[in-house]
Image (cartoon, helix red, strand yellow):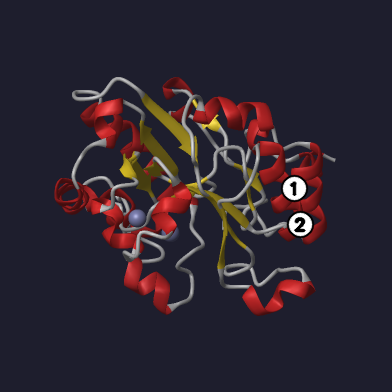
Amino acid sequence: MPSGMRYSTLEERKQYYEREFPLKRVGDWFGERENTVFAMILGRHTGIVLPEYRDIINNTVVVDDYKNLEDVREFIIQYIPEGVYYDRNLYSDIEGCSKCGMEPRDCWNCKYFLGQELAFDIDPENVVCPYHGNYEKKMEIHQGLSFCMYEFKVVRRKTLELYEELNKHYNELRFVYSGRGFHIHVMDPEAIKIKKKEREKLGKKWAEKYPIDPWVTSGEMRLIRLPYSLHGMVSRICILLSLGEIKSFDPRKDRKCFPSFLKM
Ligand SMILES: [Zn+2]
Ligand SMILES: [Zn+2]
């Protein structure tokens, strides 16, 4: 892992969500969007979890019954997870869809399903590194989820290249530092309607060219890290970045992505 990046402790996670997590900005991210489902992963990658949740350390805890974002924050503080996500699917009725009788992956045909936010996860684990090898090699030496600055710089450049490509078709692109690489979210309304088959094709076509995770683009993986949440493996905040900021963004040094427990 690049220097200075490390797992957050339970106390640090708690402190972040109690004192710093900017709910107003999270609200701005979603704007008019309704019926968002949130999810938390408690300790799958770090092994760090509250003792009372030891049994569900690897589970995805879904938050779909809440009044407002303050309520969501309270769930987060109850579990203090290593990662917080949201479901990119748009539902007209969450409860209706949860009872529609279909497997989640088939809900593309369910009547409560409106579409899915298109997103790209440009990830260092998909970069072939001269020091650490390809994805398979990294998994073999148990370094699948750690990464190095060589890989980070490749994904940073690829994010800008993918932006150039997407900008030919879309206008509302947003960039989020994912804690490891970057996410590009396509917020143009027509992108929500793209069919599953089309997304699968896109994922395949660009997986190698832009080290993206094809499962995220295809929609098979619906969850994406919540902007402004704390990435508990690297102790960084998943901040929004402007296009201009990406070029020289360095998560080892840029204090905008530092939680205050690292600033002391
Ligand atoms: Zn459904
Ligand atoms: Zn490497």
From where the camera sits, is residue 194 visible?
yes
Q: CA–CA distance between discs 2 and 1? A: 6 Å
The N terminus - image quarter: bottom right
- Three-letter code, disc 2: Gln
Q: Quadrant of residue 260?
A: top right
Q: Residue at x 31, y 64 (%)?
A: 102
Q: Give me the disc on residue 74.
A: 1
Q: Quadrant of the C terminus?
A: top right
The quadrant of the rendered image in which ligand 1 is seen is bottom left
Residue 51 percent coordinates (x, y): 78, 74
Residue 12 position in % (x across, y down):
79, 52
Q: Which residue is mark 2?
A: 78
Residue beneath the point at 51% across and 62% down? 146
Question: Residue 247 falls in which quadrant of the image?
Answer: top left
Q: Determine whether 137 is above or below 22 in the image.
A: below
Q: Dots 2 and 1: beta carbons under 8 Å?
A: yes
Q: Kindly state the secondary structure of the residue where label 2 is placed.
A: helix
**Residue 3 tag number:** none
Residue depicted at x 74% and y 48%: 74
Give the answer, above or below, for where 250 lies relative to 44: above
Where disc 1 sits, the SS reads helix
- Density class for disc 2 (Cα within 10 Å; few <14, some 14-19, many ≥20) is few
